[in-house]
Image (cartoon, coloured by chain):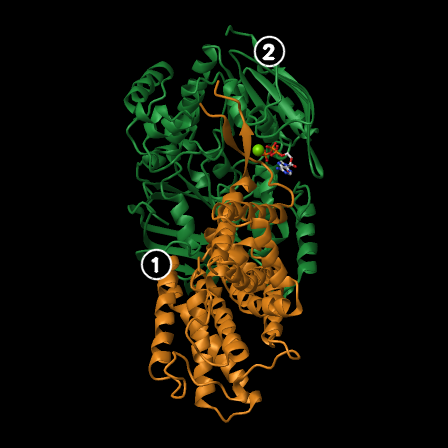
Chain colours: A orange, B green
């Protein structure tokens, strides 16, 4: 006996773009709340603290923005790939390669002026990240090798490669044997706004969002992405090159994540160190989905997720592991993916089978 | 259910979509034992009306009674429970499953999966009863279109449907298959089922239907017993004016060779040879017709010429330039327009709007771009011109084209291809699904293209059409060219024989 069934909807829910993410977040908070309650905490209190420390003070707010910058850049990158149905989950590795390349420039030209070194770091990071995106794109484009697995694998290679560098050849001789490089000279650091830690990477993220928006809405290339994403057969029929599109999209997607890596080393840590990213590249996947690949929404959602990360640290003082934040993120993703189905189906109460 | 009982009664059914009144006070009565034809121009509202009957849409106003019970279905499931079943134009079969497995899935109860051998027995019974021959163990991809359609029908019978709806069922069938289909439908009607057939082919209506309902502009304009009407009256009812059904036969003045295929061999998706040593020439100012039963290499032929399918041997020359295995873009740039068989996912992108679909062949065009940017205003103006010129009916151009009626979708595609000023047009079943008015228009356009000195390769399954339009005819059979004939010097009989595999005497031109 079945009481509830799914029926195909002819027209999607109006405002589905807003409704589903909001409900998903609410459900995730609810499910997370149950979990917190079971472990003997008061969920309301914890959510309040989380919110308070993420958005309630100017320090918390600026920390939230600091986290939102790499999140937004990585999410913009993966959103481009997702648009053409390339499941690039390698932003994390592309981020690390970008950070690594930027660091190489910083360490190689310690005497250079900011005006030369920073642009060079930017370019190197974009190229390294882009290359890391391109690498899995090649087998995908020519032999249809599933990019989900290859991009994921390349994450580990990038992270271990950076580990190798900071434990070995690039280790700071004055660093008491910690896995990190020497601090950058002034010329290799991104300036910040006032006394806060919010650095000029913010401007890069805003420009990137604007560029993505313009590309998608007004350019021929953005149109081609749309067609390839909708129907590869139609794209071929129209004379578009699927191979070229895949290669280019993955290159740009990786470059954006690489730039995120550069802003993080040049703006925040000012050196390459272990655990540089608390999983920005993975959170970016959730952000892109939640924002339905819309660049402006990505900025907004990155800000919220930045709050989740920055507020998350305060949870430790309440006796919760910082990882609880990732549980919440996971729950949000779970509910959006689950919610997708209601975009094309609706629940129907049939009250037993006839 | 006795013969002549009313199965379906629709009264004053009204359904509006944003910007269009798709059904406006429609009346339709279907009785047990009859084949009821639903006629109407493209966009007249036929599919919408049937979607209401099958529970895909809810009606805004009016009354619908099925088996004497008033209903307004919430979902297809409700309609199925009332014995209503529909065969859509695009079959919904899983191609890697066997016939039996597909029927089991269609029966919508999981228990059925476990009783495959019982289903097989029942299938055999249906085959006997209605003459619906299908091998229950065959995989769907191995079946011809006609056989796949039979599987769809069996699925409905299996669910116990007694009201059967078929949306343009013969559009994809050979004449022989169409005849067989009507024999099956007649048997089902004789058993007391009600059969509704949407069609654009008037001859079919006259030959096989009992009742005809004609729709025009969302209204039902007449319901007549077929014995009291004829093709001319039906055409007039459909279009709302006298239609000039005679065609002025004109012939081309062939000029230079535009397309030359030499010893072309190509492989199909399934891996067997779809084209074998094909030699063909199309000249400027002529229509070269390709006759043959669907599935004999026509689609592959079009794909090979347009660069969508590589060839394993041979040479393709367009305008004296070697174009063997070149990219589709090169072929487009060489001035080749292509009206593909699959308009829904190849020729058009269903989720994009009308502007974006027009852009599909113009995104490199200087008129519509400035550097990397699209000139949206120029594009929307151009699209609007095409919509007016080709009389394309749509709610708003900003809506995804998947909401357009089947015929108007085809018109949009045709408008784009013909207006891109090609010098060669590859047209694959270009009038499939079009109403008579639109068919006239398309044929007119192809003849105009010929007059302007363009070369046309017309792939069609309708011999009447080929004889009407083409200057020369090539016949394809199992991927081989049986011969090339001058239309003036041949007849339907000779072509029919060649379609069945008899080689022409005249050899290849
Ligand atoms: N889902 C929809 N949203 C908006 N408009 C629609 C939708 N479905 C149909 N229409 C519009 O309703 C009208 C009737 O369409 P319908 O598909 O019923 O025509 P039809 O008689 O089946 O035509 P054809 O012979 O071309 O298939 C058309 O103008 C079409 O654009
Ligand atoms: Mg229709």
Mark 1, Cα crowd under 10 Å, few <14 / some 14-19 / many 20+, is: some
Question: Which chain is mark 2 on?
Answer: B
Residue B371 % position (x, y):
61, 70
Q: Residue at x 46, y 51 (%)?
A: A233
Question: Which chain is mark 1 on?
Answer: A
Q: Foreground residue, B419 or B255?
A: B419
Q: Residue at x 38, y 16 (%)?
A: B130
Which quadrant holds residue A179? bottom left
Q: Which mark is residue A145?
A: 1
In the depicted structure, whether residue B132 falls above or below residue B480: above
Q: Residue at x 62, y 65 (%)?
A: A214
Q: Foreground residue, B430 or A325?
A: A325
Mark 1 vs 2: CB contact within 8 A: no
Q: Secondary structure at mark 2?
A: loop
**Gap between marks 1 and 2 measured at Cα:** 57 Å
Seen as rendered, the residue at the extreme bottom is A111
Residue A199 % position (x, y):
60, 76
Ligand 1 quadrant in view: top right
Mark 2, Cα crowd under 10 Å, few <14 / some 14-19 / many 20+, is: few
Residue B390 visible to the viewer: yes
Q: Foreground residue, A155 or B105?
A: A155
Q: Residue at x 35, y 43 (%)?
A: B483
Give the residue number, with chain letter if any, for mark 2: B68
Q: Secondary structure at mark 1?
A: loop
In the depicted structure, whether residue A309 falls above or below residue B240: below
Residue B374 % position (x, y):
63, 63
């Amino acid at each position: 006996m079945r009481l509830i069934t799914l029926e195909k909807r002819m027209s999607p829910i109006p405002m589905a773009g807003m409704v589903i993410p909001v409900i998903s977040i609410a459900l995730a908070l609810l499910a997370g709340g149950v979990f917190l309650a079971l472990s003997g905490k008061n969920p309301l209190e914890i959510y309040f603290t989380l919110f308070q420390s993420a958005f309630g003070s100017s320090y918390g707010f600026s920390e939230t923005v600091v986290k939102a910058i790499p999140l937004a850049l990585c999410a913009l990158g993966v959103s481009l790939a997702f648009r053409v149905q390339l499941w690039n989950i390698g932003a994390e590795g592309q981020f690390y390669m970008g950070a690594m390349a930027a660091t190489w420039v910083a360490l190689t030209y310690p005497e250079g002026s900011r005006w030369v070194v920073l642009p060079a770091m930017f370019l190197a990071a974009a190229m390294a990240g882009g290359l890391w995106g391109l690498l899995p794109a090649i087998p995908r484009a020519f032999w249809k090798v599933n990019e989900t697995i290859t991009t994921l694998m390349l994450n580990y290679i990038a992270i271990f490669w950076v580990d190798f560098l900071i434990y070995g050849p690039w280790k700071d001789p004055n660093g008491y044997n910690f896995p990190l490089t020497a601090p950058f000279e002034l010329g290799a650091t991104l300036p910040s706004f006032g006394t806060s830690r919010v650095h000029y990477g913010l401007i890069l993220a805003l420009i990137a969002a604007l560029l993505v928006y313009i590309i998608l809405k007004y350019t021929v290339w953005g149109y081609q992405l749309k067609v390839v994403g909708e129907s590869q057969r139609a794209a071929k029929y129209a004379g578009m090159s699927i191979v070229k599109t895949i290669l280019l999209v993955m290159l740009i997607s990786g470059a954006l994540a690489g730039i995120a890596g550069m802003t993080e080393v040049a703006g925040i840590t000012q050196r390459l160190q272990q655990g540089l990213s608390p999983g920005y590249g993975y959170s970016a996947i959730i952000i892109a989905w939640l924002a339905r690949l819309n660049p402006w929404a990505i900025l907004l959602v990155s800000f919220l997720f930045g709050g989740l990360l920055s507020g998350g640290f305060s949870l430790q003082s309440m006796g919760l592991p910082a990882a609880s934040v990732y549980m919440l993120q996971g729950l949000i993703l779970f509910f959006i993916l689950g919610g997708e189905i209601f975009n094309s189906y609706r629940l129907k109460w049939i009250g037993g089978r006839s | 259910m006795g013969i002549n009982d009313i199965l379906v009664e629709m009264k004053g059914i009204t359904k509006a979509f944003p910007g269009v009144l798709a059904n406006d006070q429609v009346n339709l009565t279907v009785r047990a034992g009859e084949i009821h034809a639903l006629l109407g121009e493209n966009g007249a509202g036929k599919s919408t009306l049937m979607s209401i009957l099958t529970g895909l849409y809810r009606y805004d106003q009016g009354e619908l009674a099925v088996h004497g019970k008033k209903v307004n279905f919430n979902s297809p499931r409700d309609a199925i429970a009332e014995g209503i079943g529909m065969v859509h134009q695009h079959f919904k079969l899983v191609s890697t499953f066997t016939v039996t497995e597909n029927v089991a899935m269609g029966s919508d109860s999981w228990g059925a999966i476990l009783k495959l051998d019982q289903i097989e027995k029942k299938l055999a019974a249906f085959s006997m009863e209605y003459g619906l021959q299908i091998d229950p163990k065959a995989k769907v991809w191995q079946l011809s279109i006609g056989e796949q359609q039979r599987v769809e029908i069996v699925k409905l019978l299996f669910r116990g449907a007694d009201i059967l709806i078929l949306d343009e069922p013969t559009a994809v069938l050979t004449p022989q298959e169409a005849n067989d289909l009507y024999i099956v439908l007649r048997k089902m009607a004789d058993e007391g089922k009600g059969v509704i057939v949407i069609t654009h082919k008037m001859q079919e209506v006259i030959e096989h239907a009992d009742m005809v309902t004609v729709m025009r502009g969302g209204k039902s304009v007449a319901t007549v017993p077929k014995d009291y009407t004829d093709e001319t009256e039906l055409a007039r009812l459909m279009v709302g004016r006298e239609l000039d059904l005679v065609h002025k036969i004109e012939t081309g003045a062939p000029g230079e060779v535009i397309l030359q295929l030499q010893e072309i061999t190509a492989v199909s998706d399934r891996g067997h040879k779809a084209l074998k040593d094909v030699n063909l020439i199309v000249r400027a100012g002529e229509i070269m017709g390709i006759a043959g039963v669907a599935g004999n290499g026509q689609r592959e032929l079009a794909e090979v010429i347009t660069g969508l399918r590589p060839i394993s041997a041979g040479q393709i020359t367009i305008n004296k330039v070697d174009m063997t295995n070149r990219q589709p873009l090169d072929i487009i740039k060489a001035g080749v327009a292509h009206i593909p068989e699959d308009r829904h996912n190849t020729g058009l992108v269903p989720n994009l709007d009308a502007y974006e679909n027009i852009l599909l062949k113009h995104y490199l065009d200087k008129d519509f771009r400035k550097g990397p940017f699209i000139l949206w205003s120029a594009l929307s103006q151009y699209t609007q011109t095409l919509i007016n010129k080709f009389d394309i009916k749509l709610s708003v151009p900003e809506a995804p084209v998947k909401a357009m009626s089947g015929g108007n979708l085809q018109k949009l595609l045709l408008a784009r291809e013909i207006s891109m000023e090609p010098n060669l047009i590859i047209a694959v079943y270009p009038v499939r699904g079009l109403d008579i008015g639109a068919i006239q228009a398309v044929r007119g356009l192809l003849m105009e293209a010929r007059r302007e000195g363009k070369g046309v390769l017309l792939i069609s399954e309708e011999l009447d059409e080929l004889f009407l339009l083409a200057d020369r005819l090539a016949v394809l059979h199992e991927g081989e060219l049986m011969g090339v004939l001058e239309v003036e010097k041949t007849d339907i009989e000779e072509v029919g024989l060649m379609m069945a595999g008899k080689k022409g005497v005249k050899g290849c031109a």
